[in-house]
Amino acid sequence: MDMENAYKRKKQPEVIRRALLDQAARITLEQGLSKVTFQAVADAVGVTKGGVMHHFSTKNALVLEVFNDAMAKFEAEVNSAMADDPVKYGSFTRAYIDATISLGEQGQEEYDNQATLYVLMLGDSELRELWAKWANEQLKKHAATDNTETLCMVRLVADGIWLSDFSGIDIADKQSLRDRLIKMTQQDFDL
């Protein structure tokens, strides 16, 4: 967006808000949470610092909204996978595996969303608490289908693969690992 035309261009608050969130997420991912400033986000979008402040009163409000946006995408992915799963036993765990272990099927946007979540969680204790709250709520909600030691272990391994992916650790055959984890979510495996 051209800063010179900021006062002349048609006002599109939702488009600007979306761009602010996207650029704040990109800066978080590429440079780290500490580099997310109103000025950096404003420069990336092509608006004034005041334009950012119009949408988000504080940096914390901006970062929280980036987190909530990433969480909403993550949760939608989990819910969609669960809705498509004909087997109830282990369905949350299988969906969690699909949402955390990126095999590239959904492209860079999916990977960026996952990585943004991880950077935000690792970089901010309040966001870690929100993640833990969401995870604990999901575990309670799906206790009837996903409350076994094996399924817990599978989710923790998926978290480890997620962190390894984000950290740039090469995993020789991620597809094979993912398939093995999915196999471990079957009820006959957990007897």
Image (cartoon, rainbow, N blue to C red):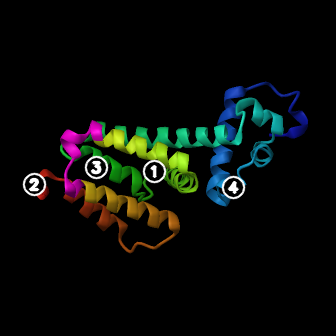
What residue is shown with label 4? 34
Camera-near label (2 vs 4) is 4
**Mark positioned earlier in the residue sequence (3 or 1):** 3
**Residue at position x 28%, y 50% in the image:** 94
Amino acid tagged 3: Thr
> Type of residue at label 4?
Ser
Label 4 near label 2: C-beta < 8 Å?
no
Q: Which mark is residue 93?
A: 3
Question: Which residue carries the number 1 mark?
Answer: 106
Type of the residue with mark 1 = Gln
Q: Residue at x 35, y 71 (%)?
A: 173
Helix, strand or loop under label 3? helix
Which residues lie in the magenta part?
140-151
Query: Which x, y percent locates residue 147?
Result: 21, 47
N-term mark: 4 or 3 = 4
Query: Viewer-proximal residue, 141 or 92?
Result: 141
Q: Residues within 10 Å of mark 3 (few under 14, many from 20)?
A: many
State the CA–CA distance, disc 3 to disc 1. Answer: 19 Å
